[in-house]
Amino acid sequence: MMNIISHNCVGAEVYKLEDCQYGNPFIWCVIPPEDFRVLYDNYEQIDFSNIKLEKDGKYYKIVIDGKVNVFYVHYKYSKEDKTPRRRKNCDILYDKIEKYIVDKYTSRLKRMSGKPLFIVTDREYIVNKEWIFGKEDLEKYVGKDDCIVVAYDDSINGDNVVRMPEKNMQPKDIAALILDKINDKKLEQ
């Protein structure tokens, strides 16, 4: 099973294109650059079962092992809103949404195994500008064998860099570029 960890929804799109089950709990989430760095640098030492669900502004987040913040931007919190707020094809009422988030995290955590492939991109669609990976953030991952960097910026180069031909491509299109890179790496081995 693949273990793709992305700081945004692109990782989920890779799983969808491969038509396989999500291999970790970091699906449909946003991980800010500083938290992603902690996750990347300390992956083997983090206790992923030690979680705390919190409300942060209008979003829910899970804090993993007191070290990594993972934001669930598809689940918005509003005391005034009595209607379900999960997009797409499921309705979750607020009295159940917190349990739903934790249950999804823990069920996907049980499937997490193997060495992860980390994915970072400079795509700017993320809801909070502080969560966007800038050039300096991306360059920290250039040359890493366990990471793919997806960049529009022509000045970011390396064997593990995938070039986005258009700024702010759709996540599913970025996922296709990533799968091409993964398949190229498999051919090289």
Image (spheres, grey):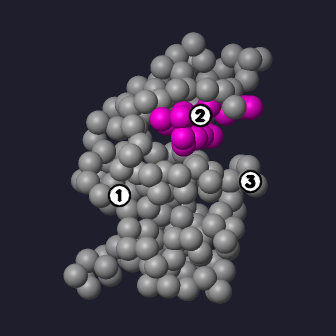
Residue 29 on the magenta span: no
The disc label shown at residue 59, or none = none
Residue at the spot 71% in from the left edge and 49% down from the top edge:
127
Q: Residue 130 — which label?
A: 3
Give the number of the disc on residue 116. 1
* Residue 73, magenta (yes or no): yes
Residue 22 visible in the displayed image: no
What is the crowding at mark 1: few (fewer than 14 residues within 10 Å), some, or many (at least 20)?
some
What residue is disc 2 on? Answer: 61
Q: Quadrant of residue 138?
A: bottom right
Q: Residue type at mark 3?
A: Glu
Three-letter residue code for mark 2: Lys
Mark 1 or mark 2, which is nearer the start of the sequence? Answer: 2
73 or 189: nearer the viewer:
189
User: Callout 3: few (<14), some (14-19), or many (20+) C-alpha neighbours within 10 Å?
Assistant: few
Q: CA distance from mark 2 to mark 1?
A: 22 Å
Residues under labels 1 and 3: Cα distance? 25 Å
Magenta-colored span:
57-74
* 45 vs 83: above or below: below
Residue at (39, 77) in percent of width and height:
181
Question: Marks 3 and 2: CB-CB under 8 Å?
Answer: no
Residue 42 screen position, x and y as percent: 44, 52
Q: Position of residue 19 (x, y in %)?
A: 31, 55
Residue 30 at x, y percent in the picture: 58, 48
Within the image, what quadrant is residue 121 found in?
bottom right
Above or below residue 46? Residue 145 is below
Which residue is at 55% across, 57% downward?
A: 37
Which image quarter is the C terminus in? bottom left
Q: Is residue 39 left or right of residue 136?
A: left
Residue 155 sits above or below residue 98 on the image: below
